[in-house]
Amino acid sequence: MDGTREAPFSAEEFEARRQRVRELAVAEGLDALLVADPANIYYLTGYDAWSFYTPQLLFVPVDGDLRFFAREMDANGAHRTITQVPGDRIFGYPETYIHQVDVHPGDWIAESLRELGYGGALRVGYEGDAAFFTVRTYRSLVDGLPSWNLVESHNLVNWARLIKSDAEIAYMRQAGRICEIAMNTAFAGLRPGRPQNQVAADVMAAQARGEGDVDGDYASIVPMFPTGAGADTPHLTWADTPTPRGLPISVELAGAHRRYHAPLARTAIIGSPQPDLERLAGVTDEALEAALEVVREGSTSDDVARAFTAVLDRNGYSKNSRLGYSIGVGYPPDWGERTVSIREGDTTVLHTNMTFHLIAGMWLTGMGYEVSESIRVTPTGCETFSSIPHGLIRLDSGR
Amino acid sequence: MDGTREAPFSAEEFEARRQRVRELAVAEGLDALLVADPANIYYLTGYDAWSFYTPQLLFVPVDGDLRFFAREMDANGAHRTITQVPGDRIFGYPETYIHQVDVHPGDWIAESLRELGYGGALRVGYEGDAAFFTVRTYRSLVDGLPSWNLVESHNLVNWARLIKSDAEIAYMRQAGRICEIAMNTAFAGLRPGRPQNQVAADVMAAQARGEGDVDGDYASIVPMFPTGAGADTPHLTWADTPTPRGLPISVELAGAHRRYHAPLARTAIIGSPQPDLERLAGVTDEALEAALEVVREGSTSDDVARAFTAVLDRNGYSKNSRLGYSIGVGYPPDWGERTVSIREGDTTVLHTNMTFHLIAGMWLTGMGYEVSESIRVTPTGCETFSSIPHGLIRLDSGR
């Protein structure tokens, strides 16, 4: 009972990932990468802990060993999940660097890298849009490694994650099954007058419980329930708002297993929908299905988005926001990979084992409807990770 | 049913907060602040949504109106919670700025600020250690507002949050009550062989459910269960690890209400503890109680830490990490305020209605013990937000 976890992937798979990332880095003319996004650190090393609220960095030279820097208390036990970095390459900065005005963990990391012989004129890529690579860390590195040329790596590791291995797909299928259970739990919990937070309680439990041997992991976004006119606030979190009758309630949530996510959105209603909602739902479902028809190896993101938009256009609707995004490993605050967006103008060619969340969120004045699928691209089409019918989910009006 | 929320605080309270923040900014010689930390945005405006995974910024000039910048889909409905910024001062950047290589929301925000007349030679404070103020946003502002002198604000708004109002304390008491229920739920759920994720499911549900009229909000950190020798990995999240007999299981979780948090840690055991664990528990409890004895208006953070350390020293133990930190509003990934640390050398004088999480986490080789209290400083001592006895929690060995 020492907390040591079985590695989520084989050593060979991890090594292949690092190889691919190093090749991409070399192609960009980089000598090394600084990786701060917890999803990228997990992808390359297996490290998995809620320690990203203090600075942590994985240093990936194109030649040479990985080094991992974290707060001392986290570095001490990191070996229990970081299966791919030996203990003597894990460095813990002292507690005295936490939340101080005059010193910062980034100073300590810069000094350590100098001591390790990495203080020279290197071209080093950093993750400019990673949530947990703060400006103070960045500036500490700029000041502490003055010979470095620090350049934006433009999500290089995220891009390396785009095509999944079979082992990753297996986790996403399990996440999809958990997602299905969580969605059905939400439907069962929506009863007129019942506060949203009670429904959220049911969902959060179902997400963590999982099913049988498949343990649920925490989802990197909490379940959300955009409702009625308030559906134009898609990222409003729950409150004690009572479940209404006769208004659309969108449910957006994910199943997660070993940090892999399968998100899903459906829209439910108790009682009878207004005709304009029924029409919106019908058109949106048709548009999503048209988009799914186009998904296959060799199609482009743009093709998929256009198939969706064509159905909306024909019916007099429009959607400003993108139709989808790449998914896989997720940590708060997001389960998207921040690489491919499914939208017009994105010319990414789809390959087998790319995985996306296609989400048709239609937020009109006074009403909203959402329907989505988490999918895997296949040679001839796509596989959906969950199995919940499309269409407005009519909950028993006798509730 | 339009999702509009009752403001969490009176307009007067919000106005007083902004006044205080502006005074602090003036004292620092700043013309304006850029606020990105969702806890700070909520504190100043009431805005509350899971939208922080794309860039958002609150611009606070020392003279003049607040402006809020967010993704268009979030800006549209922001008025449902942002009670303190009129709709015409909320700006949504277009969807085309999301996840692109060549443009960034920060560019759009910089241009908007120039158009609003803020392009001149201003001294503007930014939050260098805020998780969601990314390096790309920072660099967009540096490039797009070349006349600005951008300076680190060193958590200025976080510091303004240090002393709570009575209304905030009322929320924290409710969070403390939810915390108590969640902790007792964890104890009830710990049965030999039961996987951690099942216990987590019970806890997550209890946290969201709350009690009676008091709805639970999502906690900004998931519950954690450092166990046995693995307790030296304090931020390991749950897996399907079975609940053991005879080993200490620490439970660290929070209750949350309207984004205010009351965290708590306790250590439970099923069956009989080893004598060295009993001794560690006894000393740690005594040390925490000695520290709590010293808490009152006028004591310093250093005094409290020394009272704790004295007991450890006398008994041959030591603790590297700080004893506690300021708490209040929290968003993922943290429920701490990143201001005062309760540790030796921190000379902050305690005032009534400061609130802290004092956490005695003792992680020794092969074993760990944690006990904590979330507290409010009072003129003569302290109030604890939850009521759970100290000491190793002996769960029925007949389970």
Image (cartoon, coloured by chain):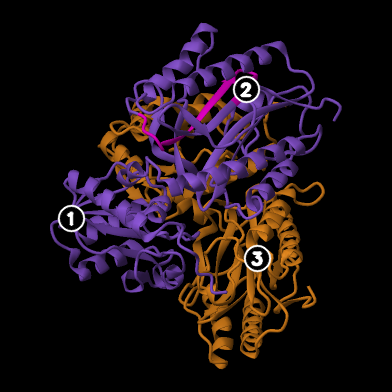
Chain colours: A orange, B purple
- For the record, the magenta segment spans B350-370
Q: In the displayed structure, does residue A29 sit left or right of residue B291? A: left
In 3D space, how far apart are the residues under numbered discs 2 and 1 (Cα atoms)?
A: 50 Å
- Depth check: B36 or A380 in front? B36
Pointer 3 with pointer 2, Cβ within 8 A? no
- Which element carries disc 1, helix, strand or loop? loop
Q: x, y percentage for residue B26? A: 18, 48
Q: Earlier in the sequence, mark 2 or mark 1?
A: 1
What's the magenta bit mostly, secondary-structure-wise?
strand
Hey, which quadrant is residue B278 in on the image?
top right
Q: Secondary structure at mark 3?
A: strand
Residue drawn at x 40%, y 43% is B164
In front here: A86 or A104? A104
Quarter holding residue B188: top right
Residue carrying label 1: B148
Callout 2 secondary element: strand
Q: Amino acid at mark 1?
A: Trp
